[in-house]
């Protein structure tokens, strides 16, 4: 059922995108490609309960995120794009360590609304997939032989599907710098955890919560561009 829901949303995005880009007069006038960083306030209460029941420290209520995103389309109309995000959350208590890492990729469709000559806002929807890696350290081995004899580290992986509605704003405070701010609700869900080939039914629930991102794009060509023709030969 979850795969059907994600597939239906993805198909709707593709059909809408094809209709927009299929217009004869559709000429992109908005392009943004930049590096991003942010914070995901993911609700991991189900996972934390399982960790604490097993004697491991609970994860913090946020994950630091970083990655890259690109969008292209109309300042006043549809836009398409993609995004890749990496994130992690870590906690420790004594020698025991809990760490959750995520890698997410998604396709985006947005509708832009201009708010000035060099700024706009947009409403968007992203659908994608990725993976999570849960690393648990029970203790620090004292010797090489101790590390071989006594297991001290476990790693579990989980496939994730993601959906995120969002609102964003972008602008260029100076000619060589473009900034994009985005607020969304990132919902990630999966069905099973895997470890060393074994598969376990998910009992930790889904991950979901607000995510805030800031992206930056540098246009260094603006710093090295030659003077315009209208300014050539002008002297005091």
Image (cartoon, grey):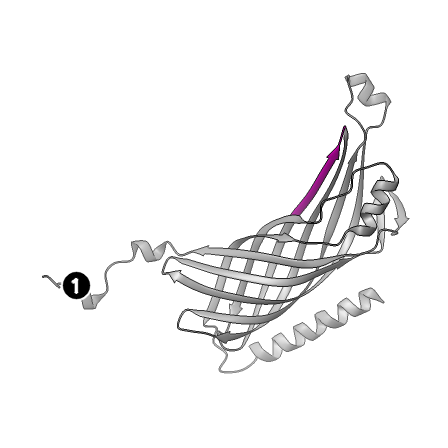
Q: Percent from the top left, x then y, of residue 88?
A: 67, 45
For mark 1, give the secondary structure: loop
Q: Is residue 88 magenta?
A: yes
Q: How many marks?
A: 1
Horizontal relation, residue 31 to residue 85: left or right: left
Q: Residue at x 57, y 69 (%)?
A: 80
Q: Residue furthest left?
A: 236
Q: Percent from the top left, x then y, of residue 81?
A: 58, 65
**In which quadrant is the N terminus drawn?**
bottom right
Horizontal relation, residue 183 to residue 159: left or right: left
Q: Is residue 108 above or below residue 134?
A: below
Q: Residue at x 67, y 48 (%)?
A: 63
What residue sits right under mark 1 in the picture? 232
Q: Residue at x 54, y 82 (%)?
A: 23
Q: Residues within 10 Å of mark 1 (few under 14, many from 20)?
A: few
Q: Is residue 219 above or below residue 28?
A: above
**In which quadrant is the C terminus drawn?**
bottom left
Horizontal relation, residue 211 to residue 217: left or right: right
């Amino acid at each position: 059922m979850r795969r059907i829901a994600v597939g239906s949303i993805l198909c709707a995005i593709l059909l809408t995108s094809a209709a927009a880009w299929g217009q004869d007069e559709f000429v992109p006038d908005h392009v943004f490609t930049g590096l991003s960083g942010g914070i995901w306030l993911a609700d991991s209460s189900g996972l934390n309960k399982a960790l604490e029941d097993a004697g491991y420290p609970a994860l913090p209520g946020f994950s630091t995120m970083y990655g890259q995103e690109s969008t292209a389309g109309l300042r006043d109309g549809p836009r398409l794009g993609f995004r890749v995000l990496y994130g992690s959350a870590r906690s420790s208590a004594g020698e025991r360590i809990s760490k959750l890492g995520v890698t997410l990729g998604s396709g985006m469709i947005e509708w832009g609304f201009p708010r000035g000559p060099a700024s706009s806002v947009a409403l968007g929807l992203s659908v994608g997939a990725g993976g999570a890696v849960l690393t648990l350290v029970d203790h620090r081995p004292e010797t090489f032989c101790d590390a071989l004899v006594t297991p001290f580290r476990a790693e579990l992986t989980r496939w994730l599907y993601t959906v995120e509605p969002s609102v964003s704003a972008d602008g260029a405070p100076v000619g060589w710098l473009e900034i994009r701010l985005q607020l969304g609700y990132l919902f990630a869900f999966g069905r099973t955890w895997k470890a060393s080939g074994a598969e376990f039914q998910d009992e930790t629930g889904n991950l979901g919560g607000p995510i805030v991102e800031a992206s930056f794009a540098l246009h260094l060509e603006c710093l090295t561009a030659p003077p315009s023709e209208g300014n050539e030969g002008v002297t005091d």
